[in-house]
Amino acid sequence: MTIAILGAGAFGAALAATLGRTTDVVLWGRNQTGRAIARLPGIELPETVTVTAEIADTDAAEVLLLALPMQTLAPFVDTHLARLSGRRLVACCKGVDLQSGLGPVEILARAGGPAPAVLTGPSFAADIAIGLPTALTLACTDDQLGARLQGQLSTPTLRLYRTTDVIGAELGGALKNVIAIASGVVIGAGLGDSARAALMTRGYAEMQRLALAHGARPETLAGLSGFGDLVLTCTSDHSRNFRFGRALGQGSAFDPTTTVEGAATARAVARIAREEKIDMPISTMVAALVDGKIGLTDAMQSLLSRPLKPE
């Protein structure tokens, strides 16, 4: 069996590194010219990984993993619809499309064919690439297909748990990035770990509020793709979203070439919350901060002055 990974960024390359230890992999990147991976310096890909800049080289693969930034997924699918049509597709990105408000699985569904899946959960690319133990969620509405994918994509160090709750898995992975930005802001502003713990807890309540309103199951949000990913992303300097939030809190510059999925997701979620009248004050404040519509002092005051209520 051959697996193709579309997207040679850090996460795509990390998946290639670990999956290549047990199966043949084709790793495609639009500008990829060699085996060196810019986002994962020092990582060597197994010889079973074919690196290419020609997307036609992925045509023979049985499974396609799309490890592309969330905001580029829809244009990519629309551009390559004929090539993707009817194939077994797995989204490996987290977020909500800013233009349509859709998650990655709904976007992949445009290609028709078997039910698309999403691979999500608490993980850093560098950990996966060097073979550190990692557990992820694989969500697919077709449980039989999900079980086959679970077997094909699991390795001795990458353990997959499956669910049919695609909505819960998608929204958990998307919303935790927004809360991670807020957590970074708290630390960057010098508000302390106690404030971060409080924000993470209230942020988790927001994640549940939106996800359950869209039909997710509570246990999904309590699992790897929700609570597990939230804890990792809100507490580690390896998290791009956390580092971005910390820079906001410090009032310092942040590398504009670094993908921060939570920024666009915050904008999309704030719009959804407003339209559906769902109370999401942290996500709304993150969107306002990212867009420069509110200052840090006013954002903190707005959250801290909300009415007291039962937990």
Image (cartoon, helix red, strand yellow):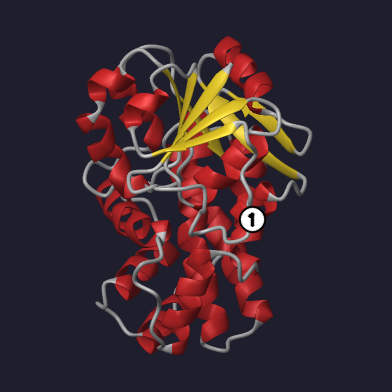
In this rendered view, identify the residue nearer to me: 270 or 113: 113
The residue lying at 64 percent from left, 33 percent from top is 19
Location of residue 110 (image quadrant): top left
Instruction: Name the residue that disc number 1 marks.
Output: 126
Residue 259 appears in the figure:
yes
Q: Residue at x 33, y 44 (%)?
A: 30
Q: Amino acid at mark 1?
A: Ala
Q: Quadrant of residue 303?
A: bottom left
Q: At which x and y percent is residue 186?
A: 54, 79
Return the residue nearer the eye: 263 or 218. Answer: 263
Label 1: how many residues lie within 10 Å, few (<14), some (14-19) or many (20+)? some
Q: Residue at x 26, y 78 (%)?
A: 292
Compared across the picture, whether 224 is left or right of 61 comes to right
Rendering coords of residue 150 (x, y %):
65, 23
Q: Quadrant of the N terminus?
A: top right
Residue 198 position, x and y percent, is 62, 70
- Quadrant for the C terminus in the image: bottom right
Query: Is 17 placed left or right of 75 in the picture?
Result: right
The answer to whether residue 279 is above or below residue 189 is above
Up/down of 215 relative to 303, above or below: above
Location of residue 139 in the rendering, given as x and y in whole percent from the top left corner: 55, 28
Residue depicted at 44% across the width and 46% down the height: 210
Q: Secondary structure at mark 1?
A: helix
